[in-house]
């Protein structure tokens, strides 16, 4: 017969599994799964505080608490020292900034450091095309720009607006989706009032995949241990960012949850679930 604490934990684990299943079908959000996971973790910590030995293992002393599996945020990878221009910055000065700082775009700020647009290399090049400077196609060969046209080549005329921005607490997958959906290479990072605090690029997002395999594996093992147990019953190996989950867990029904947790770890490219494959082959799933 199960003890009361075990019954309570079993119920919470089933709730966690249900939350993850619902998220796969679009009926629950990632935050719903996070809350369910937090509940399980709190229960396990409370249980461990009563059952733990008086002298913890030396390897566990002084360890910092790792971040949540999908708590990696834009603020962790964004650049905070941002080159910016205002709306009256002229074409030539913007081009000089891009060349000098070896960047591909600059945010355009209004008063109070609010982002109103972005000027990119593509925006500058577009203004050099035949459509923008039609006099190149005809005569006379020597043409002087009217003063009004020359003054119009400022950031306010050149910029792409409205600009797509992101908050620093957004997750890296969210930033990646925004870039993909809007076909942009970078996102200005703003606070709740719209004030610029940084910028994040595609290269910044890709930096999470530079984590060492050993570090990814350690975090993956820690992430799934409350659900499936640890080694030697359940193993996680990582090679070139591809995590492989194998072994014989007591709760095979929680394997999909564990796979989801591993997939959301920074640096994981893909997850190979050998547990489910083995169960399917044996006809026990």
Image: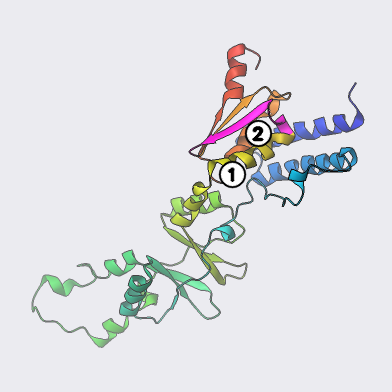
- Image coordinates of residue 265 in percent, x first then y, are 59, 43
Rendered position, 249 above or below 46: above
Specify whether residue 264 is in view: no
Residue 234 is covered by the magenta coloring? yes
The front one of 150 and 232 is: 232
- Identity of the residue furthest to the front in this view: 58
| Left or right of 121, for residue 214 | right
- Identity of the residue furthest to the top in this view: 283
- Image coordinates of residue 210 in percent, x first then y, are 49, 48
**Which badge, 2 or 1, comes first in the chain's sequence?**
1
Range of residues picked out in magenta: 227-240
- Please give the label number shown on residue 124: none
- Image coordinates of residue 149 in percent, x first then y, are 27, 82
> At x 26% / y 87%, what residue is drawn?
147
The residue tagged 1 is 215
Can you tell which quarter of the image residue 260 is in? top right
The front one of 52 and 104 is: 52
């Amino acid at each position: 017969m199960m003890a009361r604490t075990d019954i309570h934990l079993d119920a919470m684990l089933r709730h966690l599994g249900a939350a993850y299943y619902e998220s796969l079908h679009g009926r629950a959000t990632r935050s719903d799964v996070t809350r369910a996971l937090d509940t399980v973790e709190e229960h396990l910590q409370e249980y461990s505080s009563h059952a733990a030995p008086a002298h913890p293992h030396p390897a566990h002393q002084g360890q910092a608490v790792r971040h949540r599996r999908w708590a990696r945020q834009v603020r962790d990878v964004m650049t905070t020292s941002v080159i910016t221009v205002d709306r009256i910055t002229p074409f030539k000065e913007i081009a000089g900034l891009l060349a000098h700082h070896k960047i591909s775009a600059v945010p355009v700020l209004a008063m109070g450091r609010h982002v109103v647009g972005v000027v990119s290399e593509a925006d500058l090049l577009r203004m050099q095309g035949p459509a923008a400077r039609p006099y190149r196609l005809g005569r006379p060969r020597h043409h002087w720009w009217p003063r009004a046209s020359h003054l119009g080549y400022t950031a306010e005329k050149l910029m792409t607006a409205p600009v797509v921005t992101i908050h620093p607490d957004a997750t890296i997958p969210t930033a990646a989706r925004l870039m993909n959906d809007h076909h942009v290479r970078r996102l200005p990072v703003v606070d709740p009032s719209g004030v610029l605090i940084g910028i994040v690029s595609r290269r910044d997002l890709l930096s999470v995949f530079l984590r060492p395999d050993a570090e990814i594996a350690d975090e993956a093992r820690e992430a799934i241990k409350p659900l499936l147990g640890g080694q030697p019953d359940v193993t996680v190996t990582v090679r070139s960012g591809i995590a492989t989950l194998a072994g014989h867990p007591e709760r095979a029904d929680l394997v999909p949850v564990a796979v989801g947790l591993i997939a959301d770890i920074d640096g994981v490219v893909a997850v190979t679930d050998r547990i489910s494959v083995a169960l399917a082959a044996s006809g026990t799933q």
